Image (tube, rainbow, N blue to C red):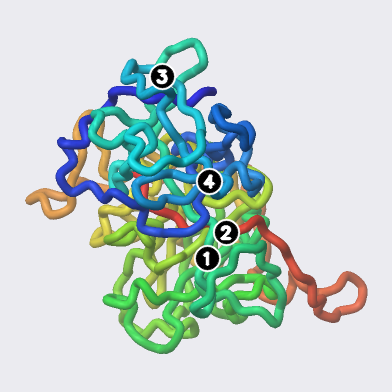
Amino acid sequence: MHLAVLGIILLSQLPHAQTMPVSSGRLLIVPGRNNAECLTAKSNNNGAGIALQGCIGSDSQYWKFTGGRIVVFGNQCLEVADGTETDGTELRISTCRDGDHNQQWSYNVREKRISWSNANKCINLSTGDGAPVCTILRIVTMSLRIFGKSATSPPLFLNNLRMDNMALIGGIDCSSVEDFCLWAPPSPGMIGGKERDMVALCTQLGLGTRVIVNGTLKGAHFVKTPDYVQVTGVGDFTKMNIPAGSPEVELDSGGVDGRGNPIGGLLYGKTFGSALQYHEWVSFISDQTFCFTACIGPEAASHCNHIYDEMGCNWNIPANYGAGVFESCDGDSAQPMGVYGTSTFHQGQPQTPSPHPAPSSSNCQAIPTVSSVSLNLRRGTGHLENVGRVTPTPTIVLPTI
């Protein structure tokens, strides 16, 4: 897979385009089709080509947006070879030069497009045989703000380290109903208006987050589908600082400015890959109900759409919400919320369509309950293990279209 400049959109057609990513610092550039691939310089030599390779956190994958340039290795800039405006021209890196138009780029946060400045061309993907593949590129950052400081090395998830702004759906293991996280206020109070300041609470100890105390969950249903993982259920979430009577509030990977609700909220799982970060996710929670979906693949933005913030769990994420059952299942992917054949519903229209039916599930495995202690008892001793976990350097998610 090669990267090329293709005439897909006109920058002038995007009057509200943001010319720089929301986040700054060391950045990853990731195609929407595959969370595990990163824009990679083939070497640090002048004229080196660009490719998509597995995200391993190497210097060849760390990019910085500065002065309209996209810089790697500190002094190598992404450029259009020889200023060629022919569709399909491959990109390369070269020593950064002030005022070089071939190294000037702008970025649209909402459309997720990197455009060659003033040339009506944008970065896209080629199959290698010249056939264009319309895959959106998005930019995520390798820096994570923790207690006001920037962390650029992989964090250890230890019992004595609290990282409240990191939700780990399934911890590092998003594999069962016993292992997931939810968002909640850091102190008692309504969520509405404070979505940006939520913290993570997880079913497991030892992740560095707060813990969902035993007895909070009254029912939980975990489903793995080809396009997403999902957990839904009911509980007494007044034990998670949510006041009684609180309506469902949406928390998602986008937010109004691309920084997420909550800001910097991160989501990892192991269902679809080793410690894979989910760049698209959507959730709702009230004092009694919760739902959480984390999506992958080219349809991630559709399955984890977060424009229906007034519609709640049952409309956005039709599923099993029954009490008294804790289970993990395989399932079919649902129809994307709001999409009905060739029509798309928009929140606020006079007539609201019914939610899609819950998709079928199978291979369900039930357990008696979910306990924050049961997964951390050292086998045979009954004592808690103080075990650290390591994840790849986290990335702050920007929205996708």
Which badge, 2 or 1, comes first in the chain's sequence? Answer: 1
Q: CA distance from mark 3 to mark 4?
A: 22 Å
SS state under label 1: strand
- Disc 4 to disc 2, how far (Cα)? 24 Å
How packed mark 3 is, by other alpha carbons closer than 10 Å (few <14, some 14-19, many 20 or more), is: many
How many neighbours does mark 1 have within 10 angstroms: few (below 14), some (14-19), or many (20 or more)?
many
Residue at 63% over, 47% down? 59
Q: Quadrant of residue 369?
A: bottom right
Residue position marked by numbered label 2 in the rendering? 394
Q: Which residue was labeled with disc 1?
A: 144
Q: Which residue is mark 4?
A: 75
In this view, the residue in front, 131 or 303, is 131
| Discs 3/1, front | 3
Q: Nearer the viewer, mark 3 or mark 4?
A: 4
Report x, y in % for residue 164: 53, 76
Instruction: Tell me if residue 227 can be seen.
Output: no
Q: Which class describes the residues within 10 Å of circle 4: few (<14), some (14-19), or many (20+)?
A: few
Compared to residue 372, the image places residue 169 above or below, namely above
Q: Tell me the SS state at disc 2.
A: loop
Q: CA distance from mark 2 to mark 1?
A: 7 Å
**Type of residue at label 3?**
Thr
Report the side of 153 relative to 81 (left or right): right
Three-letter amino acid code at the position of disc 2: Pro
Identify which residue is drawn at 36% across, 24% down. 83
Tell me the element at label 4: loop
